[in-house]
Amino acid sequence: MFSADRDLVLLEPSLLQRFGWVGQRRYGGSATLAGTTLTLPSGGQTFAGLGLGVGSTLLIDGVVVVEVVAISSPGVATVSLMRAMGSDAAIAPGLSGAVAVTAWSFSPQRRLAHEQVMGLLGLLPLGETQGAGGGVAGAVRMLEAGMIVNPRAVGRVEALLALRLIFGAQGPGRGHDAQLDRSLGLINARLEESLRALRVWL
């Protein structure tokens, strides 16, 4: 996949607070925060074991959203307020001591989005291999997603499509939600614009 949960939050800052339930709840418990260092309880779970890594997002004390910048040891991560670029320096959340942490993952939606975008481009999704002999019935060898040299452009489309899947999970019986309707309309407009502008280089 060319998108991470941080990409979704950059596009929809209230994603965790409003739509966390749509994702997979990976962690809900305590941790210790010192500057940009977040430490899980000793002897407990690890970030890798929770399925969390660089690009994952966490909700601290139910209010502050941070992204995981690095994993320095199994139970210790460097976190940051949301950065404009993944290469920017980490920004301390401004909290310290014991904090409540909740983590959701939207990897299922991002995977579906990745497969749909690769299908539109006629590329084999990341993680999938050629059939015996290569390609369809061994006759054609497909181009693969790993050949893309400008993944950020594709990642934006994947993130927007994943958000549309998340918003759509509300279902037709949710009743009228003006805020959700506005968010969905904005995402659809951005997705259409990004698809028109998308250029993929192999």
Image (spheres, helix red, strand yellow):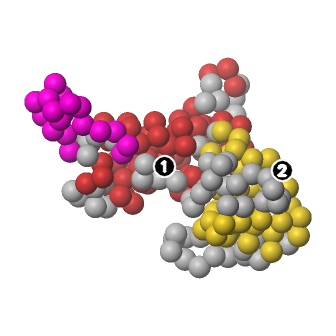
129 relative position to 32: left or right: left
Q: Closest to the observer: 163 or 76?
A: 76
Q: Closest to the observer: 184 or 199?
A: 199
**Which mark's residue is nearer the viewer, 2 or 1?**
2
5 relative position to 35: left or right: left
154 relative position to 60: left or right: left
Per the image, the residue denoted by label 2 is 29
* Magenta segment: 126-143
Q: Quadrant of residue 116?
A: top left
Query: Which residue type does callout 2 highlight?
Result: Gly
Q: Is residue 138 magenta?
A: yes
Above/below status of 149 relative to 129: below
Per the image, the residue denoted by label 1 is 159
Query: Which residue type does callout 1 highlight?
Result: Ala
Residue under the image location 23 percent in, 31 percent down = 131
Q: Position of residue 189 (x, y in %)?
A: 46, 46
Q: Position of residue 130 (x, y in %)?
A: 24, 37
